[in-house]
Image (cartoon, rainbow, N blue to C red):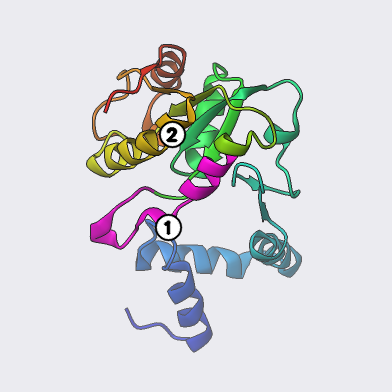
Amino acid sequence: MELPSKILEQAVEQLGTLPGVGKRTALRYALHLLRQDELEVRDMCDALLRLKTDLHRCRCCHNVSDTEVCPLCSSDKRQRGLVCVVENVQDVMALENTQQYRGLYHVLGGVISPIDGVGVNDIEIASLLRRVEQGNPCPVEEVILALPTTMEGDTTGFYISRQLRPLGVKITTLARGVAIGDNLEFADEVTLGRSIVGRIPFEE
């Protein structure tokens, strides 16, 4: 696609790096921004830049947060002995939308996938084990493995469960209301809510 401006071409190239955005969509976005007031575009750019400069990872659960400890971990209304292990931040949002879960979270930041070069040390498994072993910031009574129902998700769950068993913590997983091969963020809220409420013991 030949464009009449190098500046426009660079904008399209950058917008096209976003997931699910092809060249035509990127061009449409760029032309839309071109029509906007300069202040509006600056506000958008500032908001995007702050994602990298001002956004934190919670030091307890690794969820995204404006502060060092996220609002969920600092809330005294959560069940602090209950920790739900998820793959990513989207999964936290999906489970929170069900309004069925009142515990805390632990975001791994991925799942074990040798084919993609993701190993045990590339995700937040060690910090989860420390959290359970040290009872920091509070004693953990139950760990819910709410991972994708894929080979990679199951592999990650099996590994974590084997590491946790000597620590004597209760290990459960979501009831299989979530279809095999599905990610949590794509499950409807009713199904996901029933899965978290009807969680079952994790079996290797």
- Quarter of the image for residue 13 reads bottom left
Q: Residue at x 42, y 13 (%)?
A: 194
Q: Secondary structure at mark 1?
A: helix
Question: Left or right: where does residue 158 sit relative to residue 16?
Answer: left
Numbered badge on residue 164: 2
Q: Residue at x 40, y 39 (%)?
A: 163
- Quarter of the image for residue 203 reads top left
Q: Residue at x 32, y 18 (%)?
A: 177
Is residue 186 a member of the stretch shown in magenta?
Answer: no
Q: Is 198 above or below relative to 80?
A: above
Q: Position of residue 179 (x, y in %)?
A: 26, 26
Chain-order first, disc 1 or disc 2 = 1
Choose between 27 and 126: the one closer to the eye: 126
What range of the chain is rendered magenta? 111-131
Quarter in which the N terminus is drawn: bottom left
Numbered badge on residue 121: 1
Numbered label tally: 2
Q: Residue at x 41, y 50 (%)?
A: 110
Which mark is in front, 1 or 2? 2
- Quarter of the image for residue 52 reads bottom right
List the single residue furthest toward the front. Answer: 166
Quarter in which the C terminus is drawn: top left
Q: Position of residue 74 (x, y in %)?
A: 75, 34
Q: CA gap, disc 1 to disc 2?
A: 16 Å
Report the magenta stretch's main SS.
helix
Choose between 96 and 77: the one closer to the eye: 77
Choose between 86 and 167: the one closer to the eye: 167
Q: Amino acid at mark 1?
A: Asn
Q: Amino acid at mark 2?
A: Leu
Numbered badge on residue 24: none
